[in-house]
Image (cartoon, rainbow, N blue to C red):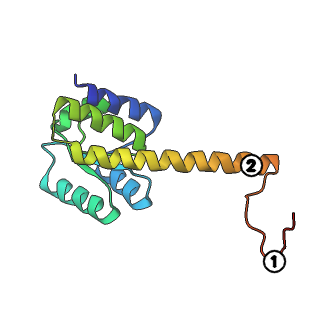
Amino acid sequence: MSRALGILGLARKAGALEIGEESAGIAARSGKARALLTANNASENTLRRVYNFAAKYGLPHLALPFTKDELGKAVGVSSCAALAFMSAGLAASFAEKLEEEFPGRFTQPLELLRLKADRIEQRKKEARAHERNVRTGKRASSKRKGRKMNG
């Protein structure tokens, strides 16, 4: 079994993966999806819909070298043509494993997912720092306008 497919199983257990075309579409429309994935034998209609979701909502799309049956087995269903990652970090890890197994094929989505994951992590750090400052009563440093500072 591919190491990348193992990450799909972990993402499912973590609740960070939407399985199926409808669920992936809902995740994309709601802004919760971070990446869209399709099987190599997905129908033309499924591919068209997922490409449209990816383009419309600015999501990376990974056309996987795995069949619907392989994806289904990895996530615990009989067959799966489309998936959506809800976590940018897990999606980046998945893309890294794909890049290791298939060099040069997933470089661009990997870079985009790493960038997204870094931005999300930075926003989380800033939010934690803000919450800590609110709890301790610290105020943001700002220049006081209209006051003369004589030393």
Looking at the image, is 144 positioned above or below residue 115? below
Quarter of the image where the C terminus is located: bottom right
Q: Are marks 1 and 2 in contact (CB under 8 Å)?
A: no
Examine the rendered structure and indicate whether residue 144 appears above or below residue 103: below
Q: Residue at x 12, y 43 (%)?
A: 41
Instruction: Report helix, strand or loop for mark 2.
Output: helix
> Quick check: 47 left or right of 120?
left
Residue sitting at x 28%, y 51%: 21
Residue 74 in the image: state x and y as whole percent. Answer: 28, 29
Q: Residue at x 36, y 50 (%)?
A: 23
The amino acid beneath tag 2 is Asn
Residue 84's disc number:
none
The residue indicated by pointer 2 is: 133
Q: Which residue is mark 1?
A: 146
User: 129 or 109, which is in the foreground?
Assistant: 129
Mark with earlier residue (1, 2): 2
In this view, the residue farthest toward the bottom is 146
Q: Give above or below for 67 relative to 128.
A: above
Q: Nearer the viewer, residue 124 or 20?
A: 124
Foreground of the two, 16 or 61: 61
Would residue 104 be visible to someone looking at this image?
yes
- Under tag 1, what secondary structure? loop
Residue 78 visible to the viewer: no
**Callout 1, which amino acid?**
Gly
| Crowd rating for badge 2 (residues with CA inside 10 Å; few <14, some 14–19, many 20+) | few
On the rendered image, what quadrant is the N terminus found in?
A: top left
Q: Can you tell which of label 1 and label 2 is closer to the viewer?
A: 1
The residue lying furthest to the right in this view is 151
The image shows residue 90 at horizontal and vertical percentages of: 39, 37
Asked where in the image residue 96 lies, by quadrant, the reply is top left
Residue found at x 82% / y 51%? 137
Name, please, the residue furthest toward the top. Answer: 1
